[in-house]
Amino acid sequence: MNDITIGIIGVGNVGSTLAFNLAISGLCNTILLKDIREDFTKAMALDISQAAKASNNNTKVKACFSKDEFKNCKIIIITAGIARKPNMSREDLLLTNTKIVKNIFDEVQEQNKDAIFIIVSNPLDTMVYAALEKSKLSRNRVFGMAGALDTSRFKHYIEEKLTINYKNIDALVIGSHSNKMVPLINHVKIDDKLLIDILNKEDINYILENTQNGGAKIVELLKTGSAYFAPAHCCFLMCKAIITDSKDVFSCSVKLLGEYNYNDLPLGVPCILGKNGIEEVLELELSKEELDELKNSMSVIENSINLLKGVKNETNI
Ligand SMILES: NC(=O)c1ccc[n+]([C@@H]2O[C@H](COP(=O)([O-])OP(=O)(O)OC[C@H]3O[C@@H](n4cnc5c(N)ncnc54)[C@H](O)[C@@H]3O)[C@@H](O)[C@H]2O)c1
Ligand SMILES: O=C(O)C[C@H](O)C(=O)O
């Protein structure tokens, strides 16, 4: 097993499910858990550690409550903060989660000088912006998980409408992690066939609407919080790509530096993940219509960042 430590901050639904995924995979030998709920976190550490032991896996899971314990992580996943409930938008979490995410960097950055940070807390793209601003780290080491999840939902709703036998769905969602995300419908391939040549307009609209509202649908049904199995598994797959230096492509929220004609703003776009975190940001060839959709999607992030800047001037968040 690799001598690798992964840290998870926020051991709620997503964080604990991610820890479980990691512990039973044997991908790393230590998992450090950090949360403000001490007994709960200790319970998670014991339970998940014992799950690893059930399959004779040596992964150690530790609950950490001091700066000195939470150290030397290769990857830190931040899932701390509040989750939305029915009739809330992700933007409603902005101020509370910005404070939490920024404070976390004060608490852990010094003891984790080489860590790659994967942000999960919502509103995702703005939390990536806040984390980059606070940490001053380069974009390859601070980025967000959302596009991988949105893509998995896109594939789920595509599959619902397929009546043919197939081996592979090739699909991607880019843009902001909001109901204005951009599922690249015209690029979707079912094996070697274009999806738009297989389905009718009504089915295509069903897929797009349900993908864009995939998170809200689960929030409405759950009533107590938001989705966590698919989000946690997507985080696990991104950690795996980094640890194994796989160079696999994931849609990640990353600060753009000229790509897609944006500068210094985060947006969900395809990225190659490897041992250095984001190894490369990929530029897709998009139609004028798709670029317009991307602009509309980016407007959600711009509005959110502007709101944050306004509040920052007043309150120093
Ligand atoms: N990016 C995505 O695709 C995606 C997917 C799912 C959830 N999320 C977001 O992830 C976040 C977590 O979701 P969840 O379902 O796990 O919520 P949750 O309420 O189950 O867990 C959040 C945890 O954060 C902890 N926490 C709060 N403040 C903290 C602090 N200062 N330091 C450490 N821990 C702290 C809480 O005690 C709690 O255990 C939410 O903001 C949610 O919206 C994002
Ligand atoms: O929908 C949410 O609030 C959580 C997450 O962003 C999701 O898409 O599941």
Image (spheres, rainbow, N blue to C red):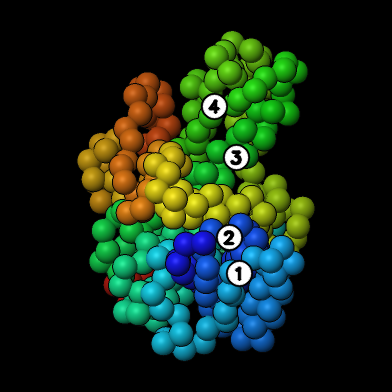
Judged by depth in the image, the label closer to the viewer, 4 or 2, is 2
Amino acid found under the numbered disc labelled 1: Asn
| Furthest-top residue in this view | 197
- In terms of sequence position, does the residue under pointer 4 or pointer 3 come before the other? 3
Amino acid found under the numbered disc labelled 2: Gly
- In terms of sequence position, does the residue under pointer 1 or pointer 4 come before the other? 1
Amino acid found under the numbered disc labelled 3: Ser
Residue placed under numbered mark 2 in the picture: 26
Residue 213 quadrant: top right
Amino acid found under the numbered disc labelled 4: Asp
Mark seen at residue 28 = none
Pick the residue in front: 222 or 91.
222
Q: Residues within 10 Å of mark 2 (few under 14, many from 20)?
A: some
Residue placed under numbered mark 3 in the picture: 152
CB contact under 8 Å: marks 2 and 1: yes
Give the residue drawn at x 61%, y 25%. 168
Mark 2 → mark 1, Cα distance in angstroms: 7 Å
CB contact under 8 Å: marks 1 and 4: no
- In terms of sequence position, does the residue under pointer 2 or pointer 1 come before the other? 2
Judged by depth in the image, the label closer to the viewer, 2 or 3, is 2
CB contact under 8 Å: marks 4 and 2: no
Give the residue drawn at x 55%, y 20%. 189
